[in-house]
Image (cartoon, grey):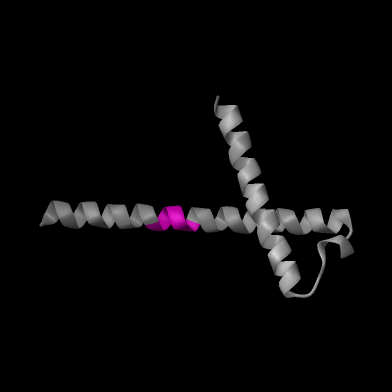
């Protein structure tokens, strides 16, 4: 059960990263088909890491916000 959820989540992140990467390449006037498969996969792995790190930052921000809310709500 957890393995299938993790696989689905990883696939979703990969699809999101692929879409984002293709958009960034298009903005620079580079067609995905112009890149070698290995180079595209390398860029895709970097984009996946960017998305994962952004997710961690958002989660940390939410946790801090909840913590501050609990502290201020508990003190007032």
Q: Position of residue 64 (x, y in %)?
A: 34, 56
- Image point (86%, 54%), residue name: 38
Specify the farthest residue to the bottom.
Answer: 28
Location of the N terminus (image quadrant): top right
* Residue 31 inside the magenta-drawn segment: no
- Image point (59%, 35%), residue name: 6
* Residue 59 inside the magenta-drawn segment: yes
Q: Residue 18 or 45: which is nearer the viewer?
A: 18
Specify the farthest residue to the top.
Answer: 1
Range of residues picked out in magenta? 57-61
Q: Position of residue 25 (x, y in %)?
A: 75, 68
- Image point (87%, 54%), residue name: 37
Q: Quadrant of residue 75?
A: bottom left
Q: Quadrant of residue 42?
A: bottom right
Q: How many marks?
A: 0
- Image point (68%, 57%), residue name: 19
Q: Position of residue 44 (x, y in %)?
A: 73, 55
Q: Name the dominant secondary structure of the magenta segment.
A: helix
Q: Is residue 28 left or right of residue 70?
A: right
Q: Is residue 47 left or right of residue 43?
A: left
Q: Quadrant of residue 30?
A: bottom right
Q: Position of residue 65 (x, y in %)?
A: 32, 57
């Amino acid at each position: 059960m957890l393995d299938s959820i993790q696989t689905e989540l990883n696939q979703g992140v990969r699809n999101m990263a692929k879409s984002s990467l293709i958009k960034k390449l298009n903005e620079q006037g580079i067609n995905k088909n112009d890149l070698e498969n290995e180079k595209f996969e390398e860029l895709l792995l970097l984009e996946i890491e960017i998305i994962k790190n952004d997710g961690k930052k958002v989660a940390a921000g939410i946790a801090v916000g909840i913590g501050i809310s609990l502290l201020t709500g508990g003190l007032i």
